[in-house]
Amino acid sequence: MILIKKIFFIYLHITGITAKSFVEDRYEQYHARSIHSTPLKLDESSYNKLVSDPRDYSVAVLLTAKDARFGCQLCHQFDPEWDLLSKSWKNGDKLGESRLIFATLDFTAGRNIFQSFGLQTVPVLMLFQPTHGKHAVSEASPLRFDFNNGPHSAERIHSWISRHLSGRLHPPIRRPIKWKNLTLILTSAVVLISFVSVSLPYILHVLQNRNTWAAISLISILLFTSGHMFNHIRKVPYVTGNERGGINYFAGGFSSQLGLETQIIAAICEFNWHPDLSKKTLIDIFTDGLLAFATISLALKAPRVLHPAAQQVVVIAWSLVIFLTYSLLLRVFRIKNGGYPFWLPPFS
């Protein structure tokens, strides 16, 4: 009886050693294959062998469908990132200390595997944890990463995998140098430096000109005070149609405006719409645009005309421009507020 027990224990010991050796040999086999080609390309048979129990290593399997018949654009977008992640991990862990195998299973080669998981969309990343050894976990089902928010970078997936492989080696991602882009940047920099060095005297003349900065200032003021920013924030239409089949250039009321309306007001004068028009002063109105140009010409250009008759014509002409512009502005006020009582001909 004692002899039988000893034989039984020896048998169990030998069986355990054999099983352990088998598991370790299986990982070494897959690791050696991944050194030459990673991620491993699987079919149903090789997939079942790779993830079968007992397993003292982890497996990251990307379930994808790159065949043109399926039209999976996301699969093709993520594929380069997956290759970069697996190759970076392999190059940083040549000895296999992290005990992680990267693999890819395409739908055309593993239809039954996809059906067993009940997948409706791809790609999907599965992470199988060890069931044997010091990194073994109690939960046998794989962890799943879905690409619900579009393609993810290799760094994002690296972070997700590393979070679940605590206490193990996490080789960093090393992106290859894009020599084409680097060459393009260097060439562009040389061309730009050459252009600037040759044209610098002319550029300085323009930059040091007061009229240049005056024009930039006026354009900026018009953009920010005529309602341009309002249009971008509210996404207002450029024009709208009316009930007669025509086009409305101005929106009724002071709480709305159209894109073309903004440009018209900017061309006429700097004007901030306000429910109480009495709060607009002459300084507010004569700021930029046509009114400002006409007023400055009348005040500064007309006195410089030496001939009395010509000077009189200039004064009458610019006065007429100012009068017509004010008439147009009052017409706009009446469009924006039907109860506005004032008007000037010819725009009533």
Image (cartoon, rainbow, N blue to C red):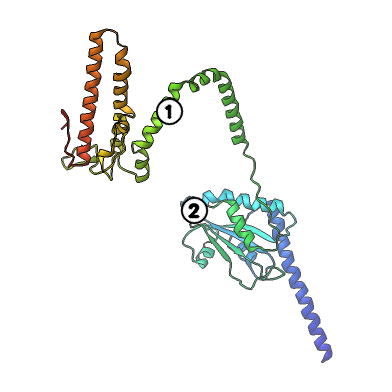
Check disc 1 and give the amino acid type. Answer: Ile
- Up the image or down, 264 lies above or below 43; here it is above
Residue drawn where x is 32% and y is 23% of the image: 293
Q: Secondary structure at mark 2?
A: loop
Q: Residue furthest top?
A: 307
Residue 144 location, quadrant: bottom right
Residue 130: image location, x then y, percent? 66, 68
Kindly check if marks 1 and 2 are in contact, taking CB atoms under 8 A apart as contact: no
Residue drawn where x is 54% and y is 17% of the image: 201
Left or right, 223 with reference to 240: right
| Number of the label disc, if any, that sits on residue 150 | 2
Q: Quadrant of the C terminus?
A: top left
Residue drawn where x is 61% and y is 35% of the image: 182
Mark 1 nearby-residue class (10 Å; few <14, some 14–19, many ≥20) = few
Q: Quadrant of the N terminus?
A: bottom right
Check disc 2 and give the amino acid type. Answer: Gly
Please state which of residues 300 and 339 is positioned toward the viewer in this rendering: 300
| Residue under numbered circle 1 | 216
Q: Secondary structure at mark 1?
A: helix
Residue 347 location, quadrant: top left
Disc 1 versus disc 2: distance between alpha carbons?
A: 41 Å
Mark 2 nearby-residue class (10 Å; few <14, some 14–19, many ≥20) = few
Mark 1 or mark 2: whose residue is earlier in sequence? 2
Residue 127 location, quadrant: bottom right
Residue 116: image location, x then y, percent? 52, 67
Whether residue 239 can be seen here:
no
Residue drawn where x is 63% and y is 54% of the image: 39
- Up the image or down, 321 lies above or below 130; here it is above
